[in-house]
Amino acid sequence: MILVNRTIVYDIVEQMLDDVDAEDHYNSTLDVAWLRKPYPQEVTTTAMVSGDRDLVPEDLPRLKRVFGAVAGDWESASIAWVARHNNVRCVILRSVSDVVGEGGSEAYGNIAHFEEGARIVLGRLIDDLPAWLRCAGVS
C-alpha cells in the first residue's frame, strides 16, 4: 500500500513555456503528517507519478531515475491538484493492481487480469477504510 506524499505529472509536453514551470504548476505535495499513527496497515510513503496514459516500459528507467518512482497511475495528480487549489486535506492510498516491467504488463491486452487485480486491492482497501478514517480523525 502506498501513502502518497507527492504527485508528479510525468507526461507533460509543454510547447509554449518551460516544461519545469508546467510541472511545478501541476505537481502537488500532500501533507500526511496529520494522520494518526499507528496506521492500520503497513504503507510506503512516497511520491506517485501520474499521467494521462498507461506506463510504458521505455519510460520506466527515466521515471525511476528522475522522480524515484515506484508506481504510477492516471488519477492521483488530478485529485491532489484539485484538493490543493481548494485548500482541502487529501489522503491518497494506492495499491498496485498490475506490475509494468521491461516487457509491459500482464494486464496489457488482458482486461480480466486488470479487473482481478483491481478487485483484490480494492477489497483490501475497503476492508481497511474504517481504520483509515479513524487515523484521519473521522468517526
Image: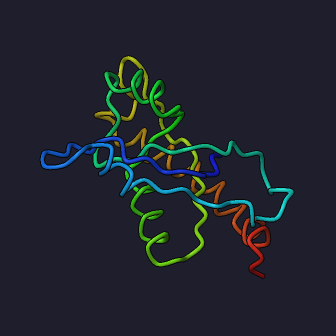
- Up-down relation of residue 70 to residue 50 (above or below): above
Q: How is the image coloured?
A: rainbow
Looking at the rendering, which quadrant does residue 62 occupy?
top left
Q: Residue furthest right?
A: 38
Relative side of 60 to 14, left or right: right
**Quadrant in which residue 102 is drawn:** top left
- The answer to whether 59 is drawn above or below residue 46 in the figure is above
Left or right: 105 in relation to 118: left
- The residue depicted at 60 percent of the width and 72 percent of the height is 89
Residue drawn at point x = 67 percent, y = 45 percent: 45
List x then y, in percent, for residue 63: 42, 30
Query: Residue 76 location, x and y as percent?
Result: 46, 56
Indicate the position of residue 111 as horizontal and vertical percent values: 34, 42
Asked if residue 83 lies left or right of residue 53, the reply is right
- The extreme top residue here reads 102
Most foreground residue, 68 or 123: 68
**Which residue is found at the position 54% from the left and 56% from the top?**
29
Quadrant placement of the C terminus: bottom right
Q: Is residue 83 left or right of residue 16?
A: right
Q: Residue 58's spot in the image, x, y percent?
A: 31, 22
Which residue is farthest bottom? 139
| Total number of numbered discs in the rendering | 0
What residue appears at the point 57 percent right and 56 percent down from the top-left corner?
122
Please tell me whether residue 114 is drawn above or below residue 89 in the rendered image: above
